[in-house]
Image (cartoon, helix red, strand yellow):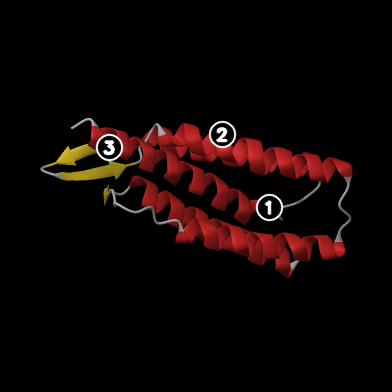
Amino acid sequence: MSNYISNVLIGLLVLFIIFYNQVRVRQVRNDMNLIFPIILIVLGLSNLKNYFNTHTLTFISLISILISLFILAVAMGAIRAYTVKLWYEGSILFRQGTLLTIVLWIASLILHFTIDYAGHTGQATLLIYYGITLFTQRLVVYSRSKHIVSNT
C-alpha cells in the first residue's frame, strides 16, 4: 500500500512540474532539451519492471500498455503541441501552453488511466506515459518552431 501511495505522490509531483512548465512563458531553445522526458521514461521502465516482478504480464495488460504508450501518448503529445502558442518578441521566439493544452493533458491522463484500469496494470506505466507524451510534444513544438523560423 505504501508503494501505491508513493507512486501517486510521485505522479502528482511530476504532473505539477509538467503543468507549471506548460503554462509559463519560455524561450524556444535552439536545441531540444529532452532530458526530463528521458529521465521519466527510464524511471518509469524501472517502475514497470518492479511491477511485473510481482504481477503477471497478461495479453490484456500487454495490449493496454502498447495502446497507452505507443498510440495514446504519442497522439496526445502531438495534438497538444499544436495548442502551444508560439510568438516572437523582437528576435526571440517564445512558447506558452494554453488552457486547451492543459485540458488536453487532463483528457489524455483520464484516457491513460482508463486504459491502465482495463488492462489491470495499475499506475505502473504512468511515468513512461508522461515521458513519451512529453517527448512527443517537445518534438512537435520544436518542429513547429523551426518552421516558423524558416518562414521569417
Query: Real-space Cα distance between discs 2 and 3?
Result: 20 Å
Q: Secondary structure at mark 2?
A: helix
In this picture, residue 29 sits left or right of residue 100: left
Residue 29 visible in image? yes
Query: According to the image, label 3 marks what residue?
Result: 86
Q: Position of residue 93 (x, y in %)?
A: 22, 43
In the picture as drawn, the residue positioned furthest to the front comes out as 150
The label nearer to you, 3 versus 1, is 3
Query: According to the image, label 2 marks what residue?
Result: 75
Task: Please give the name of the residue rendered at 53% of the width and 59% of the height, measured from the top-left corner.
Answer: 38
Q: Position of residue 131 (x, y in %)?
A: 55, 52
Type of the residue with mark 3: Leu
- Marks 2,3: beta carbons within 8 A: no
Q: Is residue 148 above or below residue 61?
A: above
- Please identify the quadrant where the N terminus is shown: bottom right
In the picture as drawn, the residue positioned furthest to the left comes out as 90
- Marks 1,2: beta carbons within 8 A: no
Type of the residue with mark 2: Ala
Seen from the viewer's position, the closer of residues 75 and 125 is 75
Query: According to the image, label 1 marks what residue?
Result: 125
Task: Point out the tag, 2 or 3, that comes first from the N-terminus.
Answer: 2
Task: Please give the name of the residue rendered at 24% of the width and 44% of the height, measured from the top-left corner.
Answer: 94
Task: Please give the name of the residue rendered at 65% of the width and 40% of the height, measured from the top-left corner.
Answer: 70
Task: Point out the tag, 3 or 1, that comes first from the N-terminus.
Answer: 3
Type of the residue with mark 1: Thr
Q: To which quarter of the image does residue 142 belong? A: top left
Task: Point out the tag, 1 or 2, that comes first from the N-terminus.
Answer: 2
